[in-house]
Amino acid sequence: MDILDRNVWFYIRDHQQQGPIGLFELKKLFEQGVLTGDSFLLSSDMDSWCMAKTLNVFQSTDEQDSINYALVWEEIKKDTYPTGRPFVRFLARIFDLALFTFFLIAFVSIFSPKFIVESSAITIFMICLILYILVEAAILSVFGNTLGKSLLNTRMKMVTGEPINFVTALKRSIFVTAAGMGLGVPIINIFCFVFSFLDLKNHGYATWDKQLGTIVLYGRVSTARMLVVSIIPVGLLIAGLVI
């Protein structure tokens, strides 16, 4: 199948990854001058972002063809991170997990404080991690995003453009918890973190996203916001354990 026949496309504009849109809408953006030959595109079947000019349908013979695509791409990558942002994704998940853990500990403490006191921190964390699989799936299927991802200007969609349904979100949460976090088991989770980091940096997408047909889009986020989001999980976990 020719690359131009693929229906779902993403594009980079104003330092943001946008989409998904159909090929018809994509062509309209070019006709209206919103996108140019220097714009970078990604289809649901492509493994990496490509400049429009490098695709047959967008190739031209004007003087702009002499642009060094590699240099332009390096500049665009600084703001759009098309090869993935492992730290941002990890931070968003830790933020969401810490927030859930805090509220769960607070809730259980009201009805069964003895359980919280007698249980080890690892036991509580493992329970929260497993329960969060269901909670995250429900949040993604209802709202389309989690609070942590929203704060870090990260969005998740199906490559078809459809909202993430509960079953897909549940499969992804299980996949991430097992393969990406090693089910929280000490030592094993370190190897899983390293594998996930290298996988995302080398391919631009996580294995589970490729398998399930989901895609994570990144936008610009300030260093200050990242620092705040980094501090909050630590505070929430400490508060939760104190409670």
Image (cartoon, helix red, strand yellow):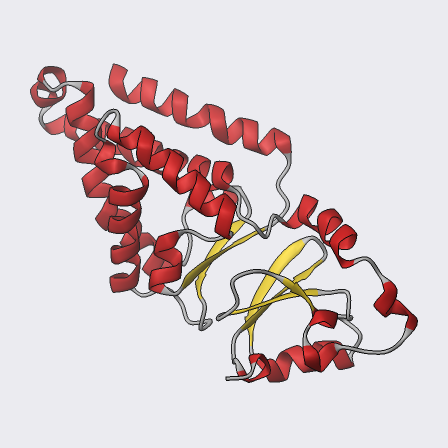
Residue drawn at point x = 69 percent, y = 44 percent: 78
In the rendered image of this protein, does residue 77 appear above or below residue 53? Answer: above
In the rendered image of this protein, does residue 66 appear above or below residue 131? Answer: below
- Give the percent coordinates (x, y) of residue 237: 33, 23
In the rendered image of this protein, does residue 70 appear above or below residue 225? Answer: below
Considering depth in this image, is 179 or 28 the residue closer to the camera?
A: 179
- Give the percent coordinates (x, y) of residue 58: 73, 78
Label tally: 0
Answer whether residue 135 is visible to the viewer in this image: yes
Query: Is 33 on the left-hand or right-hand side of 218?
Result: right
Residue drawn at point x = 41 percent, y = 58 percent: 144
Quadrant location, the C terminus = top left
In the rendered image of this protein, does residue 231 appear above or below residue 23? Answer: above
Considering depth in this image, is 174 or 37 the residue closer to the camera?
A: 37
Query: Is 216 on the left-hand or right-hand side of 186?
Result: right
Considering depth in this image, is 100 or 211 the residue closer to the camera?
A: 211
Answer whether residue 107 is visible to the viewer in this image: no
Residue drawn at point x = 65 percent, y = 55 percent: 16
Considering depth in this image, is 125 or 38 the residue closer to the camera?
A: 38
Residue drawn at point x = 41 percent, y = 51 percent: 206
Within the image, what quadrant is residue 93 found in?
top left
